[in-house]
Image: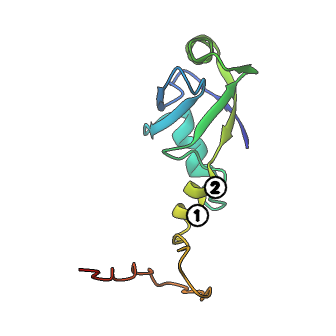
Amino acid sequence: FTVTLRKEGSSLGLNVSHDKQDRVLRVEGVFPGTAAHAWNRAQAARGERTINVGDIVFSINGVTQDQQRMLQECREREVLTLTIVRRPAEVAAAKGATALRAEASEFVPMIGKVAQPAAAEDTT
């Protein structure tokens, strides 16, 4: 999804990390009282469009695959357009989904319950 934020004298408010191999920024936190925090409060009812820990910032103002230039955009620009990608597994975890087991003989929905791993067999 795409988010356009105006800093309005405050900071963007994202704590990010980056790995040279990934060429993206990973959200590690959202600081209170900032543009990102205000966005999250406004979007809270929808849930899907909030900026969350673990989200990937793919581009900032059209700058991609260059973490230093993306960070520079954050420092120098007042209006920032971020393209954010959320990994499917993180979306499922945020909604309380559980992992599927390959050895399961059938799928049984367990709404509101957490699946317990099967007990290991003793082969000794």
> Which amino acid type is marked by label 1?
Ala
Occupied quadrant, residue 75: top right
- Secondary element at tag 1: helix
Left or right: 121, with 61 as reference point: left
Figure check: 109 above or below 57: below
The residue at the far front in this view is 124
Query: Which residue does the image show at 55% across and 55% down from the upper left?
Result: 90
* Residue 49: % across, % down: 66, 51
> Which amino acid type is marked by label 2?
Pro
Q: How many marks?
A: 2
Question: Neighbour class for label 1 at 10 Å: few (<14), some, many (≥20)?
Answer: few
Quarter of the figure with the N terminus: top right
Query: Which residue does the image show at 60% across and 86% down from the upper left?
Result: 109
Q: Label 1 belongs to which residue? A: 92
- Secondary element at tag 2: helix
Left or right: 62, with 111 as reference point: right
The residue at the far left in this view is 124
Query: Which residue does the image show at 62% across and 33% down from the upper left?
Result: 57
The residues tagged by marks 1 and 2 sit, at their Cα atoms, a distance apart of 6 Å
* Residue 114: % across, % down: 44, 80
* Residue 83: % across, % down: 71, 34
Q: Label 2 belongs to which residue? A: 88
Given residues 71 and 107, the one toward you in this image is 107
Left or right: 122, with 13 as reference point: left
Figure check: 14 above or below 105: above
Occupied quadrant, residue 33: top left
